[in-house]
Image (spheres, helix red, strand yellow):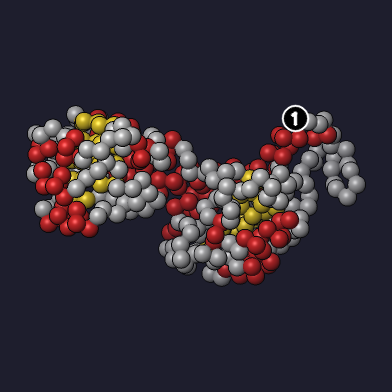
Amino acid sequence: MMRSVVIVHPQFEKVWPLAADHIYTVWEDQGQVEFIRLAHDETRTVGELLTNPGTVTRLISLCAAITLDCLKSLTSLEETVIHVHPYSTQVPQELLDYLQSNGVSVYRHKSEGFWGQSVSEFGLALTLCGLRRIPQIHHDMMTSLTPWDYDPIPHMTRGDQFGDDPNFTNGTIEGKRIRIVGAGNIASRYASFVHMMGADVAAWDPYASEPSFHRAGSRRELYLERLIQDAEIFVPMVPLTEQTKSLITAEHIYALPKGCLVVLVTRAGICDMQALRERVLSDELSLAADVFDIEPLPLDDPLLGRHNVVHTPHNAGRTVRSNERWAEMLTEQFKPRK
């Protein structure tokens, strides 16, 4: 008899509040599954919580206390996921050695692709908001009738059929030169969205294979410096690692054409933020950002509330779908059950 168990501690659900329930839903479709949600003050180990631990064949333990003695009591265990921390997939070496020596398959996330769709869609939304100043106009309408007035004003081209800010990249995605740093899980999705909407898309990523660009509808640019030269919308969209930290240097930022819209939705640390701040605050660039060099952004930060800045509080990946994909990308590794 195959016995499947999911154990989750509130410490895990503080970070991923919907993932454990989705694991249960996925496994329930395959047969009977036991779901144990622990109290905040629960101190018992997995071995102490389970009745007849020797009959468990599949176990997902999410921040529950687990020891070597627990594993020794799971004599029928075949496959497992063990998270001792919500953000870490690393199994303590002593436990990992025991599991592997006993032929137990240990699964962990192979990538952070569970955020891919949510973050790339959010990046698209930020792009649209930056082009059309949607958040600023929404806010202004609550206190003034001025947003309804399309008559030309000094030093700014306006008219009955034009209501954007001509000092920065504006209007439609269609026809825009969108230049992306990255061709991975998030960047390639974003590239496919804006390509479908009619943008001229080019991307730079020395580590990606040619199909990553082809499938996304983007032209591969071999030189980062050349990618930047004609950007109307510039999107650095890579994860923050030792290799990508400050990848976009001050020189790159200063080389962006005046009026360019910069979209930040992965990590701010990939850019020289001092240079970016300088150009944004000087009204040389516009910015649509979900991530910043300081988080939370102080209430007196000069980026807040500016006419050329759209800002959100690092919210791009925090969706139901990200939680579901977190669960699915783990459960997909387990052997099928009839």
Residue located at (65% from left, 62% from top):
274
Percent position (x, y) of residue 83? 29, 47
Residue type at the position of mark 1: Met
Which one is in front, 71 or 203? Answer: 71
Query: Quick check: 20 left or right of 287?
Result: left
Write down the quadrant of residue 37 in the picture.
top left
Residue at 75% from the left image edge and 46% from the top image edge: 307
Q: Residue at x 76, y 35 (%)?
A: 140
Q: Position of residue 20 (x, y in %)?
A: 32, 36
Quadrant assignment for the N terminus: top left
Q: Establish if 42 lies above or below 100.
A: above
Q: Quadrant of the C terminus?
A: top left
Which residue was labeled with disc 1? 142
Q: Quadrant of residue 3?
A: top left
Secondary element under disc 1, as helix, strand or loop, is loop
Residue 313, above or below 281? above
Q: Specify whether residue 67 is in view.
A: yes
Residue 280 is left or right of residue 81, and the answer is: right
Query: In screen coordinates, is 177 left or right of 5?
Result: right
Q: Position of residue 182 (x, y in %)?
A: 50, 59
Residue 102 position in % (x across, y down): 11, 53
Q: Circle 1: is it few (<14), some (14-19), or many (20+) Cα within 10 Å?
A: few
Q: Residue at x 81, y 31 (%)?
A: 144
Q: In the picture provided, is 50 more to the left or to the right than 213?
A: left
The answer to whether residue 193 is seen in the rendering is no
